Each structure stands twice: as structure tokens, then as C-alpha cells.
Amino acid sequence: MHEWALAEGVVATATRFAKENGITEVTEVVVVVGELQQVEHEVLEFAFEQLKTPLFENAKFVLKSQPAKFKCRNCGNEWTFTSEGMTEDVSEAIHFVPEMAHVYIRCNECGSPDFEVAEGRGVWLATIKGVKGDE
Amino acid sequence: MSDPRIAVIEKRFQNVRRVVAVSSGKGGVGKSMIATALALSLRDRGHSVGLLDLDFTSPATHVILGVEGLYPEEEYGIVPPIAHGIRYMSITYYSVDEPTPLRGEDVSNAIIELLAITRWGELDYLVIDMPPGIGDATLDTIRLIPRIEFIVVTTPSRVAFQSVRRLLVLLKDMGVPIIGVCENMVMKPLAYVREDVERLGIEYLVSVAYDEEVEEALGDPDALRKTRFYKELGEVSRRL
């Protein structure tokens, strides 16, 4: 359950942000999940529930999928990631370290491994909503 | 808004007593050999030891250790398997032996990912085989890994030492602790590396003679332990 480690990061970051901004009750945390990392949403949601501290007692964790888009640095081609036809080993390698895409994926126009992951790499904390202590 | 991985890295190192980064300003000085032998030597002294290969574009420690058929366990993150008594983590579990053409930003991202998800547990020492040079990867590890200390490897070559010297000055300027300098592959002892290192106020740890038997011992830690190289390097693990 590698998603657990990512969820820990989200909770730790949200906690720090809440403290820095005087938020005493978090009501919503929006997390963007890039499709390249192929994170299982159910596992991530389960981890959030388990890792919740009182600060997040009434918080909703919203997961938003973001398609992974590549842009070739060699020919400028843009395309979207799909795990179709990928072996389990390759899929797992990219799941743990998304940069392994450069090992196993090539530009579908020119064959170059030199491309940019323009969108949808991994897990990202997008927004937090909450109540400030003096409100 | 924010990268959630950064906040969890410190926690991953909370039960690691010392983090020793083995680095060099230049490739080809035997950095990976020193890092691996140091990890083995610390293990021989009864310590619990981890080895992390962060040289993503030219990983080598798996070849030196002869690691085959191992894979990290997935448990609330990933737990590195034990190889020859050492908790061992390398990008090669995922890249196998394929080329890993990563730009600086990608190297940074991959390093952050590994640091955030790898659970080391309790260790006396985590030895890191660093990427050569003073680029993104070195700066990221300094920024992100708490309590990191450096052992810097050079050869007697003036070409190598000029680059190593720049790394030493950078580390000093950044206030990063430097354990000392290992002079490796010494064929004809000269004093200038030691003198220059000491002039910088940095400890000169050891002079390790060039040892032809090391190449023969690749992939076989027991054979490596019998080399003169390993015995001479033992001085460094003794002093840590």
C-alpha cells in the first residue's frame, strides 16, 4: 500500500498549512491525482480516513483525476498517457517512480525518450478549505 | 498549491542515526565502490546499515553488491529489501538495466519520490551513493535530507581534484557537515591532495591504494572483503 505514504504527505502538508493560517477545522481538502502514477483512489481514500487527526474530523477529501499529458522536446508532439498494453512490471515501476516513464515510454511520433510530463504526473495538494479559530 | 511529498521526508529519516552521503565532484573516482564498501564495513562492525543509490543515470552499487532477484516490499510505502545484511534501495528495481534518460527536473522529482515513499525503519547509518557533481540531485539531497553529512571521494589526478575541490568549497559555503575526504586509486603517493584538503580545514580521512583485485571482486562482497582496498577503507568506518 504505497498510496499510504502519499496520503501521509497530503495530511502532513495540509496540517502544516492549516497551522500556518490559523485554521482550526479543515472542511475540505482537494487532491489532484495525476493518471501517470496510476494511484488507486479507493486505497488513497482509505488511507485518508485512517490518517485523519481531529483537525480533519469533518473534512471531505476530494480526489480529482488529471489525465497525464506528454510533450516531446524533440519534435513537439503532444499525446496523452494510456496504460493500455503496458506490462504489469512497467506499470508498477511508473506507479512507484513516475519518472520511469522516460525509461519505458517513447514519443509516439519520433520515438524520443526526451519528453516533458506536462500534466498529470502524481499526487498534488490543490486546495484546502476550513474554519479559522477566531471566526 | 503544494507538493505533498516534501512534508513527509523528514519523518522517513527520523530513526536513522547518521546519514552519510558519499559524493565526488567528478565521475570515475570510485565513489560507488567506496559507498558500497563503507556500507559493508559498517555492517561488519555490527551496525544496522542502509545503502541508497541516488546515482540514477549511472547506478552501479547493485553490480558491486551482486544484487539480483530482490524487490522492495510494499507496506505503508516501500520497504527496501536486505542484501548482504544491508537494507538496500536502488532505482534499478524499477529501471532494471535500461537507460534512464532523465533531465535535471526529472532527477529531482524521482529523488523526492524515493525519499518520500521509502521506509528505512531504524538504522545506525544510511550510506548514500550520490550522483557526481554539484547539480540538481546534490542540491536536492542537501535541501531535503535532514542531518546529511558528506564523505568526498577524489583520486590523486589534478583533473579530478579540481572538481572535487569545488564541491568541497560549495559544501563548506552551504554549511553542510563534511566528515572528510577519501583519496582513492592512489598509485604514487603525493602530498598535494592531503595538503590542500587540510588547508581548507577539512579532514583527510584515508589514502586508498589502487587495487587491481577490486574489479575481480565485483558482485561478490565476500571477495571484496578480502581486498586490500576494503581493509584500507575500514579505517573510515572505524572512525565514523
Image (cartoon, coloured by chain):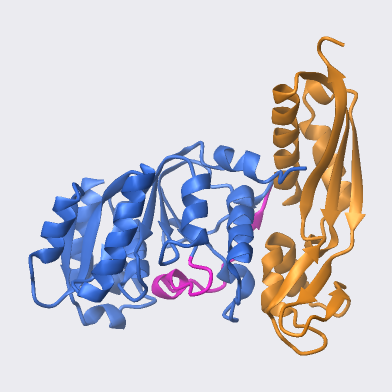
Q: Main secondary structure of the magenta part?
A: loop
Q: Quadrant of residue B99?
A: bottom right
In this rendering, would B154 be left or right of B175? Answer: left
Q: Which chain is represented by orange in the image? A: A
Taking the view exactly as shown, the residue that stands out farthest to the top is A134
Residue B62 locus on image (x, y percent)? 46, 71
In front: A106, or B134?
B134
In front: B1, or A28?
B1
Residue B34 locus on image (x, y percent)? 31, 65
Which residue is painted at 31% across and 72% down in the image? B30
Give the mark count.
0
Q: Which chain is represented by blue in the image? A: B
- Any magenta on residue B15? no
In front: B97, or A13?
A13
In this rendering, would A96 be left or right of B63? Answer: right
The vertical placement of A1 against A80, above or below, is above
- Answer yes or no: is residue B47 visible: no
In this rendering, would B145 be left or right of B203? Answer: right
Which residue is painted at 61% across and 72% down in the image? B102
Residue B128 locus on image (x, y percent)? 43, 57
In front: B89, or B31?
B31
The vertical placement of B86 against A21, above or below, is below
Magenta-tinted stretch: B55-75
Which residue is painted at 58% across and 51% down in the image? B115
Which residue is painted at 52% across and 73% down in the image? B57
Q: Quadrant of the N terminus of chain B?
A: top right
Residue B236 locus on image (x, y percent)? 22, 54
- Answer yes or no: is residue B100 visible: yes
